[in-house]
Structure formats: C-alpha cells, structure tokens
Image: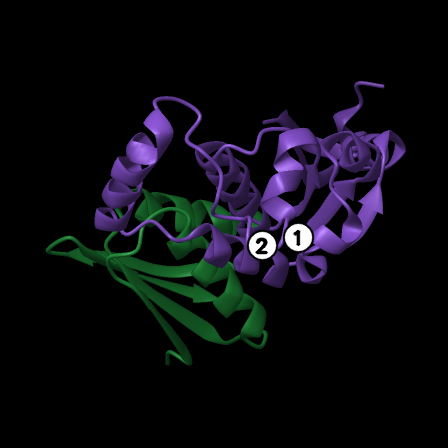
C-alpha cells in the first residue's frame, strides 16, 4: 500500500530528486513513498539516490513517458 | 592525507561569483548532494555575497552574454518554459534538507557589505578561511564557483 504520493509531473532537475528526499524524510520507517514524474533523467537518478540513502526500491514502471517509482523507507 | 575513507559524505562549495547561472549550478549540485544523503555547505565570498543581500538572490547578471539584462531576460524566458525552479525555491529546499549557508566576513568588508544588509534568515554562520578549510577537508566534493 502506498502511504505517501508525490507528483512531480512536468518538473525538471533537481526538483524530482529533492521532492523525493523531502517525502522520504517525512515518511516513517517501512512506509512506501510513490513518486510520479516525467523528467527522463530522474527515472534513472531516483533509484541511484534510493540506493545511496539505503532505502528499498520497490518498483519502477513507465507508460507513455510518465514514470512511477515506489520506495520503501 | 588522501585517505578518502576519513572524509564525510559532504559537499562544500565556494560561491565566489554572483552570476545568476553560477548560483543555479551551486544550488543544483548542493540540492542533489543533499537529496542523495550527503551533507552540504555553501561558502559565500566576494561577488557571491551580493546574492545574500536582502532581495538580492535573483538579481545576479548572466555570466556570459548578459547584454545589459537582455540576455538574462531571454534565458529567464527559456528557463520558465523549461519549468526550472526559482533560486528562492532551490535555496528553501537546500535549507529544509539541512544545507548550511556560510558568509565570509573578511570579504564583506572588501565588498562594502554590512551584516545588516544581508538576509539574516538564510545565513547559518559567519566565518573566514578557517571555517571553509574545516568544512572542505572533510568533504568528498568541494568546488569553487
């Protein structure tokens, strides 16, 4: 179940990364954060950041240029 | 020295320039570092200090082809079209994620800038070269912009 949803559709660097970080700071351990966006580089970089932060990448999907990334804190 | 294992996951950037595009670079790199779990400090000195003056954050010229403001106006238009965040938003995010703003006291004197001219709300600390070296010696990333 997704507890926290962040929409960064149309936003560009570095906003998707920053908003992901802000959401993960607010989330409690074990909670799932879902980030939805369109910035192409962020689809690759958010998983990189998740690894660096030591959280769990649950799912990455993309449809018609809109990606959805699920992260467990 | 040269032992990276002793260095913290930290980014320390000297902002020597007051140019609008360079302030963008510094804040984008710092916010990226903070988002990826690093600490970050920005050390404002010389022309960079002007961006800490009250109402001065967005007032920097373009580093190239400023053309008395025409070039900046054009670039600002393109940035708006590309939906690039404002410097104010980037600085707020920087501070929300725990980034530290340091203003150099010695160069304030050279630039004729008084503490009362600066936006105190965004400055965490005043310092000189010792403060920078202390931050930078433990940083994996350090840049001069």
Disc 2 packing (10 Å; few <14; some 14–19; many ≥20): many
Q: Chain of mark 2?
A: B
Quadrant of residue B5 in the image?
Answer: top right
Q: Position of residue B40 (x, y in %)?
A: 66, 45
Q: Is residue B117 left or right of residue A58?
A: right
Q: Position of residue B142 (x, y in %)?
A: 67, 29
For residue B123, the mark is none
Mark 1, secondary structure of its residue? loop
Residue ID at (85%, 30%):
B129
User: Where, quadrant-wise, is the C terminus of chain B in this rendering?
Assistant: top right
Foreground residue among A24 and B85: B85
Foreground residue among A51 and B60: B60
What's the distance in space between the residues labelled 1 and 2, CA to CA? 5 Å
Disc 1 packing (10 Å; few <14; some 14–19; many ≥20): many
Whether residue A73 is visible here, answered yes or no, is no
Position of residue A16 relative to residue A34, above or below, is above
Whether residue B84 is visible here, answered yes or no, is yes
Foreground residue among B74 and A1: B74
**Colour chosen for chain A:** green
Mark 2, secondary structure of its residue? helix
| Residue matched to label 1 | B99
Quadrant of residue B64 in the image?
Answer: top left
Q: Is residue A43 left or right of residue B101?
A: left
User: Where, quadrant-wise, is the N terminus of chain B in this rendering?
Assistant: top right
Q: Which chain is purple?
A: B
């Amino acid at each position: 179940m997704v507890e926290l949803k962040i929409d960064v559709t149309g936003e560009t660097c570095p906003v998707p990364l920053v908003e992901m970080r802000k959401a993960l700071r607010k989330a409690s351990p074990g909670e799932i954060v879902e980030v939805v966006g369109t910035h192409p580089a962020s689809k690759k970089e958010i998983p990189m950041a998740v690894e660096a932060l030591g959280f769990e990448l649950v799912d990455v999907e993309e449809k018609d240029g809109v990606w959805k990334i699920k992260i467990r804190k | 020295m040269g032992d990276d294992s002793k260095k913290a996951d930290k980014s320390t950037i000297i902002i020597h320039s007051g140019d609008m595009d360079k302030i963008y670079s510094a804040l984008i790199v710092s916010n990226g570092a903070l988002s990826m779990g690093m600490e970050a400090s920005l050390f404002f000195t010389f022309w960079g200090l002007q961006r800490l003056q009250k109402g001065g954050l967005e007032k920097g010229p373009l580093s190239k082809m400023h053309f008395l403001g025409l070039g900046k106006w054009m670039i600002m238009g393109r940035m708006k079209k590309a939906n690039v965040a404002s410097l104010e938003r980037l600085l707020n995010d920087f501070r929300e994620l725990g980034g530290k703003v340091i203003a150099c006291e010695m160069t304030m004197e050279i630039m004729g800038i008084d503490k009362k001219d600066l936006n105190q709300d965004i400055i965490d600390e005043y310092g000189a070269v010792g403060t920078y070296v202390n931050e930078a010696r433990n940083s994996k990333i350090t840049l001069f912009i």
